[in-house]
């Protein structure tokens, strides 16, 4: 009978930092090769790390450790942590934060935006870093409190939950060496009990400094510096440093939403030895055996189905025989055959990772059952003769080999803590998913690929890593787009690129071709203005790029076309979707104007569905009607009828011509006056761009008369719009407008006469008719918008980029949806425009653009932050100053953590008066936050400050100035200049009241 899988838990994400490799892939290759990954240090390296010389020179000191490279680096900006706060945090916790982030990314979950109730179950070794800081004797009472918050076990889980906005249970789990697998057991129970829907299990075991150990006769530490579990030469354990994290979900949820799991947790068992053993530190065969049986019972599987066991494997004279005997008995009683179960012991590779050991072993076991490869036991030569071999289900692999055990592939993982807390976990290979049917013969679609990071250097590293991954693995582009859009946090520094295939995306990332970069403003997205072009920008097939790239556009266009007369709607549909539609036919005013309105309004509707909501609208000539419709001034059906009538009326006007000039209003008027010709200004588009219009003969004569005085270009129009030749259309338009309901705009609307109509203001219906004849003052309209919405971004919604050039001239950031240039545009251009908006911080709903993709595993955040070690953690005798113990001073312009230094501390009574807030506040900010080069607009909280640091700032100000600074005032005046002004106000003498007149 099939197992009930309703209680199975999937491992959906994994991350780890272990000795021997910078990533899990390299680590796994090293394990399969049977490499010993510990490091033997030379004397100078140990002394430099702060190990006392008398210990280094002790003949019993063994300078071997499973070394973790770059353990002092930290991406503090990623977690909104100031440099000084980062220095005070135990490197263990810092690495746990990074691993938690990358594990969530590995599970295709946005680390800052998970909508799933997520619990945190964390454990770490005792903090040598905290001990070193306190022993140094340089911490005052308040700084000791900061150090405790960044290192004590009580705060591990809650700080991770806070920094990642996780709302499930947050528990610190401390059972010595078995902590992390006990944490896993608790997380599994929480998921099964409904306490959370996703769980992070994260653990760290790291010495500070990373060094070696002092061997003691009869102790557990290896005299040789080699950990050799179950080997006849085993002489003890070697320590190592590492950090790991796994993400758990109920199996049904994981299969429905995430990437393919690494494996499945079938059952867990936890107990304690109690007093039935030789001593507190001694292991118990009975307790270990009972934990394995409990896990088998919970998983509802028998021993005959297990093919691999990742042991606790300390390599000690007492521990190995007890563990081998307990595991043999437990699995034999459960039905395992002799030699059936291959044994692994990670400590032989990396050393004992202390509180992270169990989780590291679990990750190794997951890779075994996922890939079906059993690694050798590193350094193994011959079985310890004290271990039973006849009839034991256990065997030691000596070389990497394919899985030969029972199917489905199942493994056990054991972890035993000092004091007797035993835990065993059973895992299984992930379920096999069916392959997705590919649409054969369908050309690959264009996709938008986005990346973001906390700084530009990390963004560069992310782009490089993604490019290498795409080249090596060639995943579906749709899956890449979806994973990066929905399974990553949207950070400040951003990049967007488009492509149809992984190779194309990788090539564009490598060359930078078509890559758009930008930064999200710290104050939030800039106001967005939608700008709608007028006649002249139309192209046959111009709806195609919008239909391909914008979800919801085809339906919105169909709704809009339904507002026109059936025959006109039919012709419009053909013109908009057929690139071979006669261009001259579409250029006719009666067709061009309704075609442009339909495309523009449908595109604006689709953009709103993507979260692209304007703060204001503007249109050029015909585009003014689209803008009014989007602003709520006109009903879409009324606007469609008005545009159709406008096109017919203007088509019936006398033909004419239009000429674009490279000069502004005053020079254009002067040129017209000097020429004496019957042309008139039709549009003033920018300080260096105008348009004149008139009869064909007059415009031709004016063009000849200019003779190179200014740049001139004939426009592709059949009529002289916004000139006297359009006068016959004004009255019939006004008559139609008298029958149309016109409302006050719901958002600012800039008209073509240059006036900004604000929400709630009345609108004169006849103005639409008058402005069809009057001069377009688009430059004035842009100036009004720039004044009303400083820093606005202008999105040109329609074919071409004519309005974008005008917005650029007005010093506004402009983004065209398509590039124009005589073609109908492409989906790539539209997606690039949306990517550009996203890089500028606009809230584009990227998930709607990649609905066909599925979450997959992609490279995570490339953590490589600066080195952060607190000066208080450097080696020195208690009470000694730096100079007396030879601690080097920071280099000029650098803090001891390697970061840019801020203003030098100014002692009270020194050369610079401490009562000057403009000098005192930057110094105190630097002491509390670690930032240098502060500007007046620097924000205390955006730099990593919090309410606790504000209270410390107030205390320091009171100590230095003798005045009480209100906490509320510091919270409200959060910028440097704001706090300086606050303190200055408190220091100003209160004027004495004037004496009464006598």
Image (cartoon, rainbow, N blue to C red):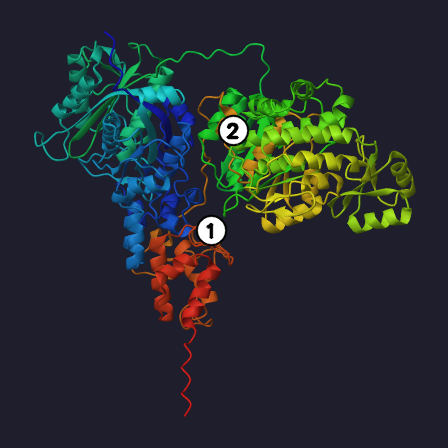
N-terminal-most mark, 1 or 2:
2
The residue identified by callout 2 is: 466
Image location of residue 937, percent across then percent down: 50, 56
Q: Quadrant of residue 563?
A: top right
Q: Nearer the viewer, residue 629 or 58?
A: 629
Image location of residue 167, percent across then percent down: 31, 37
**82 relative to 102, above or below:** below
Q: Residue furthest bottom?
A: 998
**488 relative to 369, above or below:** below
Image location of residue 52, percent across then percent down: 31, 49
Residue depicted at 24% across the width and 33% down the height: 179
Residue 33 lies left or right of residue 783; in this view the side is: left
Q: Nearer the viewer, residue 397 or 382?
A: 397
Image location of residue 430, percent across then percent down: 34, 17
Residue depicted at 28% across the width and 44% down the height: 155
- The label shown at residue 579 is none
- The label shown at residue 899 is 1
Residue depicted at 32% across the width and 27% down the height: 248
SS under mark 2: helix
Of labels 1 and 2, the one closer to you: 2
Q: Nearer the viewer, residue 318 or 98?
A: 98
């Amino acid at each position: 009978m099939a197992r009930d899988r309703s209680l199975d838990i999937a491992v959906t994400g994994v991350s780890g930092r272990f000795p021997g490799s910078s990533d899990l892939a390299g680590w796994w290759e090293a394990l399969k090769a049977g490499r010993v990954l510990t490091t033997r240090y030379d004397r100078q390296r140990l002394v430099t790390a702060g190990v006392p010389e008398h210990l280094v020179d002790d003949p019993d000191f063994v300078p071997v450790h499973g070394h973790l490279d770059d353990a002092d680096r930290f991406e503090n900006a990623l977690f909104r942590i100031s440099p000084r706060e980062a220095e005070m945090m135990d490197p263990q916790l810092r690495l746990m934060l990074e691993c938690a982030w990358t594990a969530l990314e590995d599970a295709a979950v946005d680390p800052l935006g998970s909508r799933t109730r997520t619990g945190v179950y964390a454990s770490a070794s005792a903090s040598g870093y905290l001990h070193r800081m306190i022993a140094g004797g340089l911490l005052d009472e308040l700084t000791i409190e900061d150090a405790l918050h960044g290192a004590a076990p009580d705060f591990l889980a809650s700080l991770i939950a806070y920094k990642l906005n996780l709302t499930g249970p947050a528990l610190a789990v401390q059972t010595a060496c078995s902590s992390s697998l006990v944490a896993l057991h608790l997380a599994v129970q929480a998921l099964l009990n409904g306490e959370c829907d996703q769980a992070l299990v994260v653990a760290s075991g790291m010495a500070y400094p990373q060094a070696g150990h002092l061997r003691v006769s009869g102790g557990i530490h290896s005299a040789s510096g080699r950990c050799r579990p179950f080997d006849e030469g085993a002489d003890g354990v070697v320590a190592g440093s590492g950090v790991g994290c796994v993400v758990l979900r109920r199996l049904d949820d994981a299969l429905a939403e995430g990437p393919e799991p690494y494996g499945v947790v079938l059952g867990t068992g936890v107990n304690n030895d109690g007093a039935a053993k030789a001593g507190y530190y001694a292991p118990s065969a009975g307790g270990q055996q009972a934990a394995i049986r409990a896990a088998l019972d919970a998983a509802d599987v028998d021993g005959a189905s297990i093919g691999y066991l990742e042991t606790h494997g300390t390599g000690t004279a007492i521990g190995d025989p007890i563990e081998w005997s307990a595991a043999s008995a437990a699995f034999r009683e459960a039905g395992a055959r002799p030699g059936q179960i291959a044994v692994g012991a990670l400590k032989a590779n990396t050393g004992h990772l202390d509180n992270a050991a169990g989780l590291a072993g679990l990750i190794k076991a997951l890779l075994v059952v996922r890939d079906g490869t059993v690694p050798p036991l590193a350094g193994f030569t011959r079985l310890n003769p004290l271990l039973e071999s006849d009839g034991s289900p256990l065997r030691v692999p000596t070389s990497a080999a394919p899985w030969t055990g029972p199917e489905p592939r199942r493994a056990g993982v054991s972890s035993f803590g000092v004091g007797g807390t035993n835990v065993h976990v059973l895992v299984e290979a992930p379920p096999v998913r069916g392959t997705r049917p590919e649409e054969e013969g369908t050309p690959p679609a264009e996709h938008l690929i986005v990346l973001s990071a906390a700084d530009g250097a990390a963004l560069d590293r992310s782009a490089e890593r993604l490019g290498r991954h795409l080249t090596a693995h060639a995943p579906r582009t749709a899956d890449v787009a979806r994973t990066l859009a929905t399974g990553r946090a949207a950070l400040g520094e951003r990049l967007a690129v488009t492509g149809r295939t992984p190779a194309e995306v990788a090539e564009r990332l490598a060359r930078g071709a078509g890559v758009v970069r930008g930064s999200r403003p710290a104050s939030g997205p800039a106001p967005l203005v939608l700008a709608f072009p007028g006649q002249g920008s139309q192209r046959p097939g111009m709806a195609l790029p919008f239909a391909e790239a914008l979800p919801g556009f085809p339906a919105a266009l169909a709704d809009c076309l339904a507002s026109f007369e059936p025959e006109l709607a039919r012709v419009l549909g053909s013109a908009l979707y057929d690139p071979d539609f006669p261009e001259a036919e579409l250029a006719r005013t009666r067709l061009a104007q309704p075609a442009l309105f339909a495309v523009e309004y449908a595109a604006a509707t689709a953009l709103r569905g993507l979260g692209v909501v304007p703060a204001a609208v503007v249109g050029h000539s015909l585009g003014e009607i689209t803008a009014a419709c989007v602003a709520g001034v006109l009903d879409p059906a009324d606007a469609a009828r008005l545009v159709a009538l406008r096109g017919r009326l203007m088509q019936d006007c006398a033909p004419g011509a239009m000429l674009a000039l490279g000069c502004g209003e005053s020079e254009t008027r002067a040129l017209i006056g000097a020429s004496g010709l019957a042309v008139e200004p039709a549009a003033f588009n920018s300080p260096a761009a105008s348009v004149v219009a008139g009869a064909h003969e007059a415009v031709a004569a004016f063009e000849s008369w200019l003779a190179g005085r200014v740049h001139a270009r004939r426009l592709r129009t059949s009529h002289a719009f916004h000139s006297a030749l359009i006068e016959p259309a004004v009255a019939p338009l006004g008559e139609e407008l008298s029958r149309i309901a016109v409302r006050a705009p719901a958002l600012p609307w800039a008209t073509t006469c240059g006036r900004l109509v604000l929400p709630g203001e009345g609108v004169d219906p006849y103005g639409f008719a008058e402005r069809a004849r009057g001069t377009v003052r688009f430059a004035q309209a842009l100036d009004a918008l720039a004044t009303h919405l400083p820093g606005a971004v202008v999105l040109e919604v329609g074919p071409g980029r004519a309005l974008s050039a005008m917005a650029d001239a007005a010093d506004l950031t402009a983004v065209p949806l398509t590039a124009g240039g005589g073609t109908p545009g492409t989906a790539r251009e539209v997606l690039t425009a949306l990517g550009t908006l996203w890089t500028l911080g606009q809230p584009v709903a990227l998930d709607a653009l990649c609905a066909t993709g599925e979450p997959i595993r992609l490279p995570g955040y490339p953590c490589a932050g600066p080195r952060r070690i607190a000066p208080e953690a450097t080696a020195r005798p208690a009470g000694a100053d730096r100079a007396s113990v030879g601690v080097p001073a920071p280099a000029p312009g650098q803090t001891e953590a390697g970061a840019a230094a801020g203003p030098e501390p100014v002692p009270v009574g020194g050369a610079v008066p401490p009562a000057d807030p403009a000098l005192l506040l930057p110094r105190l900010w630097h002491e509390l936050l670690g930032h240098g080069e502060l500007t007046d607009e620097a924000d205390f909280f955006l730099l990593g400050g919090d309410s606790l640091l504000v209270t410390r700032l107030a205390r320091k100000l009171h100590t230095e100035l003798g005045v009480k600074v209100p906490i509320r005032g510091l919270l409200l005046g959060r910028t440097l200049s704001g706090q300086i002004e606050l303190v200055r106000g408190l220091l100003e003498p209160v004027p004495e009241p004037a004496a009464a007149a006598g």
